Protein backbone atom coordinates (compact mmCIF):
# COMPACT_ATOMS: atom_id res chain seq x y z
CA UNK A 1 0.00 0.00 0.00
CA UNK A 2 2.99 2.31 0.44
CA UNK A 3 3.36 2.43 -3.31
CA UNK A 4 0.30 4.64 -3.38
CA UNK A 5 2.18 7.31 -1.42
CA UNK A 6 5.58 7.18 -3.04
CA UNK A 7 5.23 7.75 -6.75
CA UNK A 8 8.37 9.54 -7.78
CA UNK A 9 6.47 11.39 -10.49
CA UNK A 10 4.11 12.89 -7.89
CA UNK A 11 7.00 14.53 -6.10
CA UNK A 12 8.50 15.74 -9.36
CA UNK A 13 5.16 17.35 -10.14
CA UNK A 14 5.29 19.46 -6.94
CA UNK A 15 8.96 20.34 -7.38
CA UNK A 16 8.34 24.09 -7.87
CA UNK A 17 6.28 24.22 -4.66
CA UNK A 18 8.88 22.20 -2.75
CA UNK A 19 11.66 24.48 -4.01
CA UNK A 20 9.81 27.60 -2.96
CA UNK A 21 9.03 26.17 0.48
CA UNK A 22 12.70 25.30 0.98
CA UNK A 23 13.82 28.73 -0.11
CA UNK A 24 11.19 30.33 2.14
CA UNK A 25 12.54 28.46 5.16
CA UNK A 26 16.11 29.16 4.05
CA UNK A 27 15.39 32.89 4.03
CA UNK A 28 14.21 32.64 7.65
CA UNK A 29 17.51 31.04 8.71
CA UNK A 30 19.70 33.16 6.44
CA UNK A 31 18.20 36.29 7.98
CA UNK A 32 19.99 35.59 11.28
CA UNK A 33 23.39 35.69 9.61
CA UNK A 34 22.91 39.09 8.03
CA UNK A 35 23.96 42.50 9.27
CA UNK A 36 21.30 45.19 9.14
CA UNK A 37 22.72 46.78 6.00
CA UNK A 38 22.90 43.44 4.18
CA UNK A 39 19.21 42.58 4.48
CA UNK A 40 18.77 42.96 0.73
CA UNK A 41 20.51 39.57 0.41
CA UNK A 42 17.29 38.00 1.75
CA UNK A 43 15.53 39.37 -1.29
CA UNK A 44 18.27 38.00 -3.53
CA UNK A 45 17.84 34.53 -2.01
CA UNK A 46 14.07 34.74 -2.46
CA UNK A 47 14.58 35.77 -6.09
CA UNK A 48 16.88 32.80 -6.69
CA UNK A 49 14.17 30.48 -5.32
CA UNK A 50 11.54 32.07 -7.51
CA UNK A 51 13.88 31.78 -10.48
CA UNK A 52 14.33 28.05 -9.89
CA UNK A 53 10.57 27.58 -9.56
CA UNK A 54 9.94 29.52 -12.77
CA UNK A 55 12.51 27.48 -14.71
CA UNK A 56 10.96 24.26 -13.42
CA UNK A 57 7.49 25.42 -14.44
CA UNK A 58 8.86 26.38 -17.84
CA UNK A 59 10.12 22.81 -18.20
CA UNK A 60 6.69 21.40 -17.33
CA UNK A 61 4.97 23.35 -20.06
CA UNK A 62 6.26 21.45 -23.16
CA UNK A 63 5.61 18.13 -21.37
CA UNK A 64 1.94 18.98 -20.90
CA UNK A 65 1.08 20.72 -24.18
CA UNK A 66 -1.43 18.59 -26.04
CA UNK A 67 -1.31 15.90 -23.33
CA UNK A 68 -3.79 14.73 -20.73
CA UNK A 69 -3.44 16.41 -17.31
CA UNK A 70 -1.14 14.70 -14.84
CA UNK A 71 -3.04 13.58 -11.75
CA UNK A 72 -0.92 12.87 -8.69
CA UNK A 73 -1.22 11.97 -5.00
CA UNK A 74 -4.27 9.79 -5.48
CA UNK A 75 -6.10 12.31 -7.64
CA UNK A 76 -5.80 15.23 -5.21
CA UNK A 77 -3.25 17.19 -7.25
CA UNK A 78 -3.70 18.02 -10.93
CA UNK A 79 -0.94 19.36 -13.10
CA UNK A 80 -2.25 20.64 -16.41
CA UNK A 81 -1.34 23.48 -18.74
CA UNK A 82 -3.84 25.73 -16.98
CA UNK A 83 -2.19 25.16 -13.60
CA UNK A 84 1.31 25.66 -15.01
CA UNK A 85 0.42 28.95 -16.70
CA UNK A 86 -1.33 30.27 -13.58
CA UNK A 87 1.65 29.25 -11.44
CA UNK A 88 4.03 30.99 -13.82
CA UNK A 89 2.03 34.22 -13.51
CA UNK A 90 2.03 33.85 -9.70
CA UNK A 91 5.80 33.23 -9.54
CA UNK A 92 6.57 36.16 -11.85
CA UNK A 93 4.25 38.46 -9.90
CA UNK A 94 5.88 37.43 -6.62
CA UNK A 95 9.33 38.04 -8.10
CA UNK A 96 8.31 41.54 -9.21
CA UNK A 97 6.92 42.22 -5.72
CA UNK A 98 10.22 41.11 -4.16
CA UNK A 99 12.04 43.55 -6.46
CA UNK A 100 9.67 46.34 -5.47
CA UNK A 101 10.04 45.64 -1.77
CA UNK A 102 13.79 46.04 -1.30
CA UNK A 103 14.00 49.83 -1.27
CA UNK A 104 10.50 50.35 0.08
CA UNK A 105 11.03 48.24 3.22
CA UNK A 106 14.27 50.09 3.93
CA UNK A 107 12.40 53.38 3.90
CA UNK A 108 9.66 51.96 6.10
CA UNK A 109 12.30 50.61 8.49
CA UNK A 110 10.88 47.09 8.35
CA UNK A 111 13.44 45.23 6.30
CA UNK A 112 13.15 41.78 7.87
CA UNK A 113 13.69 38.29 6.51
CA UNK A 114 10.22 37.10 7.57
CA UNK A 115 8.72 39.35 4.94
CA UNK A 116 10.28 37.42 2.07
CA UNK A 117 9.66 34.06 3.72
CA UNK A 118 5.96 34.90 4.08
CA UNK A 119 5.80 36.08 0.46
CA UNK A 120 7.27 32.78 -0.75
CA UNK A 121 5.04 30.64 1.48
CA UNK A 122 1.99 32.59 0.37
CA UNK A 123 3.03 31.88 -3.22
CA UNK A 124 3.31 28.17 -2.35
CA UNK A 125 -0.26 28.26 -1.03
CA UNK A 126 -1.41 29.88 -4.26
CA UNK A 127 0.37 27.29 -6.37
CA UNK A 128 -1.32 24.43 -4.57
CA UNK A 129 -4.62 26.27 -4.82
CA UNK A 130 -4.23 26.39 -8.58
CA UNK A 131 -3.47 22.67 -8.81
CA UNK A 132 -5.69 21.19 -6.12
CA UNK A 133 -8.51 18.91 -7.25
CA UNK A 134 -9.64 17.82 -3.81
CA UNK A 135 -11.54 19.96 -1.31
CA UNK A 136 -9.04 19.31 1.51
CA UNK A 137 -6.03 20.37 -0.57
CA UNK A 138 -7.89 23.41 -1.84
CA UNK A 139 -8.89 24.50 1.66
CA UNK A 140 -5.41 24.11 3.14
CA UNK A 141 -3.84 25.91 0.19
CA UNK A 142 -6.33 28.75 0.46
CA UNK A 143 -5.61 29.18 4.16
CA UNK A 144 -1.85 29.06 3.66
CA UNK A 145 -2.17 31.82 1.10
CA UNK A 146 -4.54 33.88 3.24
CA UNK A 147 -2.77 33.57 6.61
CA UNK A 148 0.50 34.80 5.09
CA UNK A 149 -1.35 37.73 3.53
CA UNK A 150 -2.91 38.77 6.85
CA UNK A 151 0.52 38.91 8.50
CA UNK A 152 2.05 40.79 5.56
CA UNK A 153 -0.79 43.33 5.60
CA UNK A 154 -0.05 44.11 9.24
CA UNK A 155 3.69 44.01 8.70
CA UNK A 156 4.27 47.62 9.77
CA UNK A 157 3.47 46.91 13.39
CA UNK A 158 3.57 50.46 14.72
CA UNK A 159 1.54 51.87 11.86
CA UNK A 160 -2.11 52.31 12.87
CA UNK A 161 -3.47 51.94 9.36
CA UNK A 162 -1.48 48.79 8.67
CA UNK A 163 -2.79 47.15 11.85
CA UNK A 164 -6.32 48.13 11.21
CA UNK A 165 -6.15 46.82 7.65
CA UNK A 166 -4.74 43.54 8.94
CA UNK A 167 -7.49 43.03 11.49
CA UNK A 168 -10.23 43.85 8.99
CA UNK A 169 -8.67 41.59 6.38
CA UNK A 170 -8.26 38.83 8.94
CA UNK A 171 -11.81 38.95 10.32
CA UNK A 172 -13.51 39.15 6.94
CA UNK A 173 -11.14 36.60 5.43
CA UNK A 174 -11.77 34.12 8.26
CA UNK A 175 -15.51 34.70 7.95
CA UNK A 176 -15.36 34.01 4.22
CA UNK A 177 -13.35 30.85 4.88
CA UNK A 178 -16.16 29.76 7.19
CA UNK A 179 -18.74 30.29 4.44
CA UNK A 180 -16.58 28.51 1.90
CA UNK A 181 -16.04 25.63 4.28
CA UNK A 182 -19.76 25.29 4.92
CA UNK A 183 -20.31 24.99 1.18
CA UNK A 184 -17.54 22.41 1.02
CA UNK A 185 -19.15 20.34 3.79
CA UNK A 186 -22.46 20.29 1.89
CA UNK A 187 -20.68 19.38 -1.34
CA UNK A 188 -19.03 16.53 0.52
CA UNK A 189 -22.47 15.47 1.75
CA UNK A 190 -23.76 15.50 -1.83
CA UNK A 191 -20.75 13.83 -3.41
CA UNK A 192 -19.70 11.41 -0.67
CA UNK A 193 -16.11 12.35 -1.47
CA UNK A 194 -13.87 15.36 -1.35
CA UNK A 195 -12.65 14.81 -4.93
CA UNK A 196 -13.98 17.34 -7.40
CA UNK A 197 -14.50 14.80 -10.19
CA UNK A 198 -16.68 12.54 -8.01
CA UNK A 199 -18.68 15.51 -6.73
CA UNK A 200 -19.37 16.52 -10.34
CA UNK A 201 -20.63 12.99 -11.14
CA UNK A 202 -23.00 12.95 -8.16
CA UNK A 203 -24.27 16.45 -8.90
CA UNK A 204 -25.08 15.39 -12.44
CA UNK A 205 -27.10 12.43 -11.15
CA UNK A 206 -29.28 14.60 -8.91
CA UNK A 207 -32.53 16.11 -10.14
CA UNK A 208 -31.77 19.82 -10.42
CA UNK A 209 -32.29 22.26 -8.92
CA UNK A 210 -32.66 20.85 -5.42
CA UNK A 211 -32.29 23.00 -2.29
CA UNK A 212 -29.21 21.28 -0.85
CA UNK A 213 -27.10 21.79 -3.96
CA UNK A 214 -28.34 25.39 -4.21
CA UNK A 215 -27.23 26.16 -0.66
CA UNK A 216 -23.92 24.37 -1.21
CA UNK A 217 -23.26 26.35 -4.38
CA UNK A 218 -24.26 29.72 -2.94
CA UNK A 219 -22.20 29.44 0.27
CA UNK A 220 -19.21 28.15 -1.66
CA UNK A 221 -19.42 30.94 -4.21
CA UNK A 222 -19.96 33.56 -1.50
CA UNK A 223 -16.69 32.45 0.08
CA UNK A 224 -14.90 32.71 -3.26
CA UNK A 225 -16.45 36.10 -4.05
CA UNK A 226 -14.87 37.36 -0.83
CA UNK A 227 -11.44 36.20 -1.96
CA UNK A 228 -11.70 37.77 -5.40
CA UNK A 229 -13.32 40.96 -4.00
CA UNK A 230 -16.60 40.81 -5.91
CA UNK A 231 -19.61 42.87 -4.80
CA UNK A 232 -21.33 42.41 -2.27
CA UNK A 233 -18.28 40.94 -0.55
CA UNK A 234 -15.78 43.64 -1.51
CA UNK A 235 -15.81 45.88 1.60
CA UNK A 236 -12.40 44.80 2.82
CA UNK A 237 -10.66 45.71 -0.43
CA UNK A 238 -10.32 49.51 -0.22
CA UNK A 239 -9.34 49.47 3.46
CA UNK A 240 -6.80 46.69 3.09
CA UNK A 241 -5.33 48.28 -0.03
CA UNK A 242 -4.96 51.62 1.72
CA UNK A 243 -3.56 50.30 4.99
CA UNK A 244 -1.20 47.57 3.83
CA UNK A 245 2.43 48.39 2.97
CA UNK A 246 2.36 49.49 -0.68
CA UNK A 247 4.45 46.53 -1.86
CA UNK A 248 1.93 44.18 -0.23
CA UNK A 249 -0.95 46.08 -1.80
CA UNK A 250 0.70 45.39 -5.14
CA UNK A 251 1.04 41.73 -4.16
CA UNK A 252 -2.53 41.15 -2.97
CA UNK A 253 -3.97 43.03 -5.92
CA UNK A 254 -2.38 40.54 -8.32
CA UNK A 255 -1.14 37.16 -7.14
CA UNK A 256 -4.07 36.06 -4.92
CA UNK A 257 -6.47 37.30 -7.60
CA UNK A 258 -4.83 35.03 -10.16
CA UNK A 259 -4.81 32.08 -7.76
CA UNK A 260 -8.37 32.62 -6.56
CA UNK A 261 -9.66 32.96 -10.10
CA UNK A 262 -7.89 29.76 -11.13
CA UNK A 263 -9.44 28.05 -8.10
CA UNK A 264 -12.83 29.53 -8.96
CA UNK A 265 -12.62 28.27 -12.55
CA UNK A 266 -11.56 24.82 -11.45
CA UNK A 267 -14.39 24.53 -8.90
CA UNK A 268 -16.96 25.77 -11.40
CA UNK A 269 -15.81 23.67 -14.35
CA UNK A 270 -14.54 20.53 -12.62
CA UNK A 271 -17.12 20.22 -9.81
CA UNK A 272 -20.12 22.49 -10.40
CA UNK A 273 -20.40 22.06 -14.17
CA UNK A 274 -23.77 20.22 -13.86
CA UNK A 275 -25.13 23.38 -12.19
CA UNK A 276 -23.81 25.79 -14.82
CA UNK A 277 -27.22 27.32 -15.53
CA UNK A 278 -27.56 28.22 -11.85
CA UNK A 279 -24.12 29.72 -11.33
CA UNK A 280 -24.34 31.58 -14.60
CA UNK A 281 -27.31 33.56 -13.29
CA UNK A 282 -25.45 34.28 -10.06
CA UNK A 283 -22.30 35.33 -11.91
CA UNK A 284 -24.21 37.70 -14.20
CA UNK A 285 -25.74 39.49 -11.20
CA UNK A 286 -22.49 39.70 -9.29
CA UNK A 287 -20.46 40.88 -12.28
CA UNK A 288 -22.93 43.68 -13.07
CA UNK A 289 -22.89 44.82 -9.42
CA UNK A 290 -19.10 44.54 -9.26
CA UNK A 291 -18.48 46.56 -12.42
CA UNK A 292 -20.99 49.21 -11.37
CA UNK A 293 -19.67 49.71 -7.86
CA UNK A 294 -16.00 49.43 -8.76
CA UNK A 295 -16.17 51.91 -11.61
CA UNK A 296 -18.43 54.45 -9.93
CA UNK A 297 -16.65 54.42 -6.56
CA UNK A 298 -13.21 54.82 -8.19
CA UNK A 299 -14.26 58.20 -9.62
CA UNK A 300 -14.29 60.00 -6.26
CA UNK A 301 -11.19 58.53 -4.60
CA UNK A 302 -8.30 60.77 -3.59
CA UNK A 303 -6.01 58.13 -2.09
CA UNK A 304 -4.26 56.30 -4.90
CA UNK A 305 -4.09 52.95 -3.12
CA UNK A 306 -7.80 53.11 -2.38
CA UNK A 307 -8.34 54.16 -5.96
CA UNK A 308 -6.56 51.05 -7.18
CA UNK A 309 -8.67 49.02 -4.75
CA UNK A 310 -11.82 50.09 -6.58
CA UNK A 311 -10.11 49.77 -9.92
CA UNK A 312 -9.30 46.15 -9.01
CA UNK A 313 -12.95 45.54 -8.12
CA UNK A 314 -13.99 46.80 -11.55
CA UNK A 315 -11.46 44.49 -13.23
CA UNK A 316 -12.87 41.58 -11.23
CA UNK A 317 -16.26 42.48 -12.71
CA UNK A 318 -14.85 42.17 -16.25
CA UNK A 319 -13.16 38.88 -15.39
CA UNK A 320 -16.46 37.44 -14.11
CA UNK A 321 -18.01 38.22 -17.50
CA UNK A 322 -15.66 35.65 -19.03
CA UNK A 323 -17.21 33.03 -16.73
CA UNK A 324 -20.68 34.00 -17.92
CA UNK A 325 -19.60 33.15 -21.45
CA UNK A 326 -17.84 29.99 -20.28
CA UNK A 327 -21.08 28.73 -18.71
CA UNK A 328 -22.52 28.52 -22.23
CA UNK A 329 -19.70 26.16 -23.13
CA UNK A 330 -17.72 28.92 -24.82
CA UNK A 331 -13.98 28.20 -24.70
CA UNK A 332 -13.05 31.75 -25.57
CA UNK A 333 -14.63 32.92 -22.32
CA UNK A 334 -12.03 31.07 -20.28
CA UNK A 335 -9.25 31.98 -22.72
CA UNK A 336 -10.23 35.60 -22.20
CA UNK A 337 -9.96 35.24 -18.41
CA UNK A 338 -6.49 33.69 -18.67
CA UNK A 339 -5.26 36.45 -21.01
CA UNK A 340 -6.85 39.13 -18.85
CA UNK A 341 -5.21 37.78 -15.69
CA UNK A 342 -1.81 37.68 -17.40
CA UNK A 343 -2.19 41.21 -18.70
CA UNK A 344 -3.68 42.54 -15.47
CA UNK A 345 -0.78 41.15 -13.41
CA UNK A 346 1.82 43.12 -15.34
CA UNK A 347 -0.04 46.39 -15.80
CA UNK A 348 -1.16 46.56 -12.18
CA UNK A 349 2.28 45.72 -10.81
CA UNK A 350 3.73 48.36 -13.13
CA UNK A 351 1.35 51.02 -11.84
CA UNK A 352 2.15 50.09 -8.25
CA UNK A 353 5.88 50.27 -8.99
CA UNK A 354 5.42 53.94 -9.86
CA UNK A 355 3.38 54.52 -6.69
CA UNK A 356 6.06 52.85 -4.57
CA UNK A 357 8.71 55.22 -5.92
CA UNK A 358 6.68 58.09 -4.46
CA UNK A 359 7.34 56.84 -0.90
CA UNK A 360 10.12 59.01 0.50
CA UNK A 361 11.45 59.74 3.93
CA UNK A 362 8.67 61.91 5.34
CA UNK A 363 6.20 61.56 2.53
CA UNK A 364 3.77 58.68 2.31
CA UNK A 365 3.08 59.44 -1.34
CA UNK A 366 -0.23 57.64 -1.56
CA UNK A 367 -2.44 60.58 -2.52
CA UNK A 368 -3.21 61.22 -6.16
CA UNK A 369 -1.89 64.76 -5.66
CA UNK A 370 1.51 63.35 -4.69
CA UNK A 371 1.88 62.34 -8.32
CA UNK A 372 1.32 65.92 -9.44
CA UNK A 373 3.94 67.32 -11.79
CA UNK A 374 5.63 63.98 -12.24
CA UNK A 375 6.17 64.81 -15.91
CA UNK A 376 8.36 67.77 -15.00
CA UNK A 377 10.35 65.92 -12.34
CA UNK A 378 10.77 62.45 -13.85
CA UNK A 379 9.49 62.29 -17.43
CA UNK A 380 10.43 58.63 -17.83
CA UNK A 381 8.35 57.55 -14.86
CA UNK A 382 5.42 59.69 -15.94
CA UNK A 383 5.40 58.10 -19.39
CA UNK A 384 5.61 54.60 -17.92
CA UNK A 385 2.68 55.39 -15.62
CA UNK A 386 0.78 56.70 -18.64
CA UNK A 387 1.34 53.40 -20.45
CA UNK A 388 0.13 51.38 -17.45
CA UNK A 389 -2.94 53.58 -17.02
CA UNK A 390 -3.80 53.35 -20.73
CA UNK A 391 -3.48 49.61 -20.44
CA UNK A 392 -5.69 49.49 -17.34
CA UNK A 393 -8.27 51.53 -19.23
CA UNK A 394 -8.01 49.13 -22.19
CA UNK A 395 -6.67 51.44 -24.92
CA UNK A 396 -4.80 49.85 -27.88
CA UNK A 397 -1.95 49.13 -28.54
CA UNK A 398 -1.43 48.19 -24.88
CA UNK A 399 -2.04 44.78 -23.36
CA UNK A 400 -5.18 45.87 -21.50
CA UNK A 401 -6.98 46.21 -24.83
CA UNK A 402 -6.28 42.56 -25.72
CA UNK A 403 -7.69 41.42 -22.36
CA UNK A 404 -10.90 43.44 -22.70
CA UNK A 405 -11.27 42.61 -26.39
CA UNK A 406 -11.41 38.85 -25.74
CA UNK A 407 -13.89 39.28 -22.88
CA UNK A 408 -16.21 41.33 -25.10
CA UNK A 409 -15.74 38.92 -27.99
CA UNK A 410 -16.74 35.92 -25.88
CA UNK A 411 -19.83 37.77 -24.64
CA UNK A 412 -20.91 38.58 -28.18
CA UNK A 413 -20.27 35.01 -29.36
CA UNK A 414 -22.59 33.70 -26.64
CA UNK A 415 -25.26 36.31 -27.30
CA UNK A 416 -24.97 38.35 -24.10
CA UNK A 417 -25.20 41.64 -25.98
CA UNK A 418 -26.54 43.71 -23.12
CA UNK A 419 -23.62 42.67 -20.89
CA UNK A 420 -21.15 43.54 -23.64
CA UNK A 421 -22.72 46.99 -24.05
CA UNK A 422 -22.65 47.58 -20.30
CA UNK A 423 -19.00 46.54 -20.11
CA UNK A 424 -18.08 48.95 -22.92
CA UNK A 425 -19.94 51.80 -21.19
CA UNK A 426 -18.03 51.14 -17.97
CA UNK A 427 -14.78 50.99 -19.93
CA UNK A 428 -15.47 54.59 -20.93
CA UNK A 429 -16.10 55.55 -17.30
CA UNK A 430 -12.82 53.84 -16.40
CA UNK A 431 -11.03 55.94 -19.01
CA UNK A 432 -12.30 59.05 -17.23
CA UNK A 433 -11.03 58.15 -13.78
CA UNK A 434 -7.68 56.80 -14.96
CA UNK A 435 -7.17 60.09 -16.75
CA UNK A 436 -7.57 61.97 -13.47
CA UNK A 437 -4.14 60.60 -12.59
CA UNK A 438 -2.78 61.49 -16.02
CA UNK A 439 -4.04 65.05 -15.60
CA UNK A 440 -2.36 65.28 -12.19
CA UNK A 441 0.92 64.01 -13.62
CA UNK A 442 1.04 66.14 -16.75
CA UNK A 443 -0.91 69.31 -15.98
CA UNK A 444 -0.35 70.12 -12.32
CA UNK A 445 2.69 71.61 -10.60
CA UNK A 446 4.94 69.47 -8.44
CA UNK A 447 4.33 70.06 -4.70
CA UNK A 448 7.94 69.43 -3.59
CA UNK A 449 11.37 68.49 -4.89
CA UNK A 450 12.23 65.57 -2.61
CA UNK A 451 14.13 63.06 -4.77
CA UNK A 452 12.23 59.93 -5.80
CA UNK A 453 12.96 56.56 -4.19
CA UNK A 454 14.24 54.71 -7.22
CA UNK A 455 16.62 51.79 -6.96
CA UNK A 456 17.84 48.88 -9.07
CA UNK A 457 14.97 46.61 -7.90
CA UNK A 458 12.21 49.01 -8.87
CA UNK A 459 13.91 49.78 -12.17
CA UNK A 460 14.02 46.11 -13.15
CA UNK A 461 10.40 45.63 -12.03
CA UNK A 462 9.27 48.62 -14.09
CA UNK A 463 11.23 47.35 -17.08
CA UNK A 464 9.66 43.90 -16.96
CA UNK A 465 6.16 45.28 -16.42
CA UNK A 466 6.32 47.79 -19.26
CA UNK A 467 7.96 45.30 -21.62
CA UNK A 468 5.22 42.75 -21.04
CA UNK A 469 2.44 45.34 -21.21
CA UNK A 470 3.63 46.54 -24.60
CA UNK A 471 4.67 43.12 -25.92
CA UNK A 472 1.30 41.50 -25.21
CA UNK A 473 -0.41 44.54 -26.68
CA UNK A 474 1.59 44.67 -29.91
CA UNK A 475 2.32 41.01 -30.55
CA UNK A 476 -0.36 39.03 -28.68
CA UNK A 477 -0.29 35.88 -30.87
CA UNK A 478 1.98 33.63 -28.73
CA UNK A 479 0.17 34.64 -25.54
CA UNK A 480 -3.23 33.90 -27.06
CA UNK A 481 -1.96 30.50 -28.17
CA UNK A 482 -0.69 29.85 -24.63
CA UNK A 483 -4.02 30.84 -23.09
CA UNK A 484 -5.93 28.64 -25.57
CA UNK A 485 -3.67 25.72 -24.69
CA UNK A 486 -4.17 26.44 -20.99
CA UNK A 487 -7.96 26.13 -21.12
CA UNK A 488 -7.94 23.05 -23.36
CA UNK A 489 -7.92 20.54 -20.43
CA UNK A 490 -11.32 21.86 -19.32
CA UNK A 491 -13.02 21.07 -22.60
CA UNK A 492 -11.70 17.64 -23.52
CA UNK B 1 -30.50 6.23 15.90
CA UNK B 2 -30.49 10.00 15.55
CA UNK B 3 -31.18 10.81 11.89
CA UNK B 4 -28.83 12.88 9.73
CA UNK B 5 -31.24 15.80 9.53
CA UNK B 6 -30.94 16.44 13.28
CA UNK B 7 -27.18 16.81 13.04
CA UNK B 8 -27.48 19.07 10.02
CA UNK B 9 -30.07 21.21 11.82
CA UNK B 10 -27.67 21.59 14.76
CA UNK B 11 -24.91 22.52 12.36
CA UNK B 12 -27.09 25.14 10.64
CA UNK B 13 -28.15 26.62 13.99
CA UNK B 14 -24.56 26.88 15.19
CA UNK B 15 -23.45 28.35 11.87
CA UNK B 16 -26.20 30.97 11.83
CA UNK B 17 -25.47 31.89 15.46
CA UNK B 18 -21.83 32.34 14.54
CA UNK B 19 -22.63 34.43 11.49
CA UNK B 20 -25.13 36.57 13.43
CA UNK B 21 -22.55 37.11 16.17
CA UNK B 22 -19.98 38.08 13.54
CA UNK B 23 -22.28 40.82 12.30
CA UNK B 24 -23.67 42.02 15.65
CA UNK B 25 -20.76 41.75 18.09
CA UNK B 26 -18.63 44.82 18.71
CA UNK B 27 -15.58 43.36 20.43
CA UNK B 28 -12.88 42.05 18.12
CA UNK B 29 -12.24 39.00 20.31
CA UNK B 30 -15.95 38.12 20.42
CA UNK B 31 -16.16 38.48 16.66
CA UNK B 32 -13.22 36.13 16.33
CA UNK B 33 -14.89 33.62 18.67
CA UNK B 34 -18.01 33.73 16.50
CA UNK B 35 -15.87 32.75 13.52
CA UNK B 36 -14.53 29.80 15.51
CA UNK B 37 -18.14 28.83 16.23
CA UNK B 38 -18.85 28.84 12.49
CA UNK B 39 -15.88 26.58 11.84
CA UNK B 40 -17.08 24.18 14.51
CA UNK B 41 -20.57 24.14 13.00
CA UNK B 42 -18.89 23.02 9.78
CA UNK B 43 -17.06 20.31 11.71
CA UNK B 44 -20.39 18.96 13.00
CA UNK B 45 -21.71 18.80 9.45
CA UNK B 46 -18.58 17.04 8.22
CA UNK B 47 -18.72 14.47 11.02
CA UNK B 48 -22.41 13.78 10.46
CA UNK B 49 -21.98 13.34 6.71
CA UNK B 50 -18.94 11.17 7.24
CA UNK B 51 -20.83 8.91 9.66
CA UNK B 52 -23.87 8.55 7.42
CA UNK B 53 -22.03 8.24 4.11
CA UNK B 54 -19.60 5.73 5.56
CA UNK B 55 -16.53 7.46 4.07
CA UNK B 56 -13.59 8.77 6.06
CA UNK B 57 -12.88 11.91 4.02
CA UNK B 58 -15.13 14.01 6.24
CA UNK B 59 -13.37 13.01 9.43
CA UNK B 60 -10.01 13.73 7.81
CA UNK B 61 -11.29 17.13 6.78
CA UNK B 62 -12.27 17.88 10.40
CA UNK B 63 -8.68 17.34 11.52
CA UNK B 64 -7.47 19.79 8.93
CA UNK B 65 -10.11 22.34 9.88
CA UNK B 66 -9.03 22.10 13.54
CA UNK B 67 -5.39 22.62 12.58
CA UNK B 68 -6.21 25.58 10.36
CA UNK B 69 -8.41 27.09 13.09
CA UNK B 70 -5.48 26.86 15.50
CA UNK B 71 -3.15 28.53 12.99
CA UNK B 72 -5.76 31.19 12.37
CA UNK B 73 -6.09 31.82 16.10
CA UNK B 74 -2.32 32.28 16.40
CA UNK B 75 -2.17 34.78 13.55
CA UNK B 76 -5.43 36.48 14.49
CA UNK B 77 -4.60 37.01 18.15
CA UNK B 78 -1.16 38.35 17.20
CA UNK B 79 -2.78 40.90 14.90
CA UNK B 80 -5.35 41.80 17.56
CA UNK B 81 -2.58 42.38 20.14
CA UNK B 82 -0.77 44.66 17.69
CA UNK B 83 -3.97 46.65 17.23
CA UNK B 84 -4.55 46.88 20.97
CA UNK B 85 -1.03 48.23 21.53
CA UNK B 86 -1.69 50.98 19.02
CA UNK B 87 -5.09 52.16 20.16
CA UNK B 88 -5.88 50.68 23.59
CA UNK B 89 -9.29 49.53 22.40
CA UNK B 90 -10.78 46.37 21.01
CA UNK B 91 -14.04 47.91 19.85
CA UNK B 92 -14.71 47.46 16.14
CA UNK B 93 -16.15 50.99 15.97
CA UNK B 94 -12.75 52.40 16.87
CA UNK B 95 -11.17 50.79 13.83
CA UNK B 96 -12.11 53.72 11.64
CA UNK B 97 -8.93 55.55 10.66
CA UNK B 98 -9.66 54.76 7.01
CA UNK B 99 -12.97 56.09 5.74
CA UNK B 100 -13.87 57.41 2.35
Image (cartoon, coloured by chain):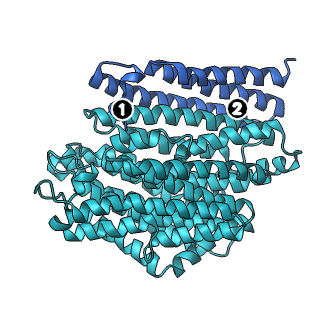
Chain colours: A cyan, B blue
Using residue A308 as the reference point, say whether residue A450 is left or right of it: left
Mark 2: which secondary structure? helix
Disc 1 residue crowd, few under 14, some 14–19, many 20+, Cα 10 Å: many
Q: Nearer the viewer, residue A323 or A138?
A: A323
Q: Which residue is mark 2?
A: B59
Quarter of the picture holding the N terminus of chain B = top right
- Cα separation between marks 1 and 2: 36 Å
**The residue marked by circle 2 belongs to what chain?**
B
Q: Which residue is mark 1?
A: A164
Using residue A109 as the reference point, say whether residue A415 is left or right of it: right
**The residue marked by circle 1 belongs to what chain?**
A
In this rendering, which labeled residue sits more in front, label 1 or label 2? 1
When the figure is inspected, residue A81 is found, relative to residue A165, above or below; the finding is: below
Quarter of the picture holding the C terminus of chain B = top left
Disc 2 residue crowd, few under 14, some 14–19, many 20+, Cα 10 Å: some
Residue A237: % across, % down: 45, 43
Q: Nearer the viewer, residue A242 or A301?
A: A301
The structure residue drawn at horizontal position 66% and vertical position 44%, both measured from the top left corner, is A135
Mark 1: which secondary structure? helix
> Residue A298, can we see it?
yes
Q: Quadrant of residue B9?
A: top right
* Total count of labels: 2
The structure residue drawn at horizontal position 64% and vertical position 60%, both measured from the top left corner, is A419
When the figure is inspected, residue A450 is found, relative to residue A461, above or below; the finding is: above
Residue A315: % across, % down: 50, 57
Q: Quadrant of residue A270?
A: bottom right
Residue A132: % across, % down: 62, 52
Amino acid sequence: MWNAFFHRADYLAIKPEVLLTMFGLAVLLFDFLLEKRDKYLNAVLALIGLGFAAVQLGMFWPLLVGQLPYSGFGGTFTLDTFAVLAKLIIVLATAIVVLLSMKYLEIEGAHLGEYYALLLLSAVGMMFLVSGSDLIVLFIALELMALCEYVLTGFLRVNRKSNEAAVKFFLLGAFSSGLLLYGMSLLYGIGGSTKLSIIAQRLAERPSPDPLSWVAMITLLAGIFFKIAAVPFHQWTPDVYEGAPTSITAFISVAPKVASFAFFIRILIAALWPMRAEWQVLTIGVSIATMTLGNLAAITQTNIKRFFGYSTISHVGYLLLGLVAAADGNREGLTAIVIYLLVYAFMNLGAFSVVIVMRRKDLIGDEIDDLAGLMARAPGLAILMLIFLLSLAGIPPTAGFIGKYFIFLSLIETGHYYLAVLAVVYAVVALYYYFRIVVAMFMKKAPDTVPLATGPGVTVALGVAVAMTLLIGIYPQPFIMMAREAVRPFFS
Amino acid sequence: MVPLSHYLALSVILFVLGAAGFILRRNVISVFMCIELMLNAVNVAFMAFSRFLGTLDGQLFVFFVIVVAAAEAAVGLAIIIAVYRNRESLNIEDLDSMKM
